[in-house]
Image: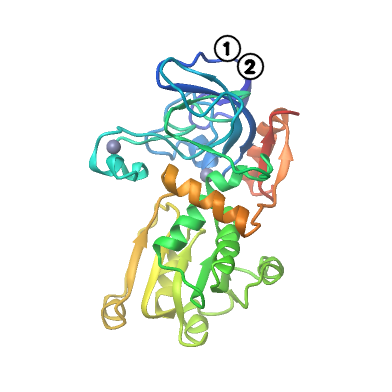
Amino acid sequence: MRAAVITEPHAPLTLVDREVPEPGPGEILVKVVGSGMCFSEINQQRGHYPGAVYPAIPGHEISGVVAELGPGVTWPAVGTPVGAQFLYDSCGHCDQCARGDQVVCRRMRITGVGVDGGYAEYFLARAGYLTPLPADLDPIAAAPLMCAGITAFNGLRKAGTRPGAKVAVIGMGGVGELTVRFALAMGARVAVLGRSRRAEPKARELGAELFVATAEQDPAEALAAWDGGADIVVNAAPDSRTAAASIGGLDTDGTLLLAGSSADPLPLPVPQMLFRRLSVIANPSGSPADLRDTLAFAVAARIVPDVVPVSLDEAPDVLARMGEGTWSGRAVIDLRR
Ligand SMILES: [Zn+2]
Ligand SMILES: [Zn+2]
């Protein structure tokens, strides 16, 4: 099969020919249709990803069709359209796994980072970690829902988003844009924070009522002037400096949600946190149950990510351009090309 691999840290993505893997006990072979290209692949390529193994086939935003079941696996049937996510598998028996909260299992593995992912014609999944795709979901456009989508939706609900809540979103990348769309569909009012005004037209078009360019305006002041402040600030960029500077723009009982990883520490203004009873919470992606909910909500709310389909042959160049900052749009590898 055709595949793309990162052979070692700092090496470019390379096209290779590999044997189609054989599903063993507890495994499922998926014929990949769409494979989203996520910015975290840049961190993986730069060697900044904890727990990464090399060489690896990257990619954790996978849509495809069940091609073959390994011994002992009975579901989902061959031919079922499925999605695979950031969470590859987990121990299966700790308290978190028993509760269906596998993404916070201490032995969880990440698709495409700890084990081969979706930049290939076939992907070997673990039984119990695939999600059937709802009918009528385009397999290419749906790919980013497996990562950016679940991160946005699940984070918003963990932060208590409700109709009428004021949600401020830092950054309009993959997670940020979907956070805006999911928050609006949940009935929230939305503000977007960006460094420059570059993302303002897109934010307004999606339905944001306020845009704050942090290079021009103090985010805390701008948010505090928004009917008393934001109920939720989502750090989707992620940008610790802007997140810290936005805390003063939270209303009483407000929540700062960390929806992505950053190496920069987050300084917290303790008196403000205390007297406004503020919280900081963090949420990494989600578990298979959360992906089901994400996909069902996306279908009901007609949230379809805007994507740029590319071929596997184009993927090395696209990833290089993503790293240089000269690629715009959400690339999804269409393995049928
Ligand atoms: Zn991702
Ligand atoms: Zn576990």
How has the structure been colored for display?
rainbow
Badge 2 marks a residue whose secondary structure is loop
**Separation of marks 2 and 1 at Cα, in angstroms:** 6 Å
In the foreground, 118 or 199: 118
Q: Which residue is the extreme one toward the left? A: 95
Q: Amino acid at mark 1?
A: Glu
* Image location (x, y in percent) of residue 314: 72, 32
Q: Amino acid at mark 2?
A: Met
* Image location (x, y in percent) of residue 171: 56, 62
Residue behind label 1 places its C-beta within 8 angstroms of ligand 1: no
The numbered dot on residue 273 is none
Residue 323 visible in the picture: no
Q: Give the class, few, some or many, for how many residues have Cα within 10 Å of label 1's Cα (few <14, many ≥20).
A: few
Q: Is residue 302 above or below residue 133?
A: below
Q: Is residue 260 left or right of residue 197?
A: left
* Image location (x, y in percent) of residue 74: 46, 23
| Residue located 55% across and 72% down the image | 187
* Image location (x, y in percent) of residue 58: 53, 31
Q: Give the class, few, some or many, for how many residues have Cα within 10 Å of label 2's Cα (few <14, many ≥20).
A: few
Residue behind label 2 places its C-beta within 8 angstroms of ligand 1: no
Residue designated by label 2: 1
Residue 84 visible in the picture: yes
Q: Earlier in the sequence, mark 2 or mark 1?
A: 2
In the foreground, 59 or 123: 123
Q: Is residue 105 left or right of residue 72?
A: left
In the foreground, 325 or 59: 59
The answer to whether the residues at label 2 and label 1 have Cβ atoms under 8 Å apart is yes
Badge 1 marks a residue whose secondary structure is loop
Image quadrant in which the N terminus is located: top right
Q: Is residue 261 above or below residue 273?
A: above
Residue designated by label 1: 19
| Residue located 27% across and 75% down the image | 270
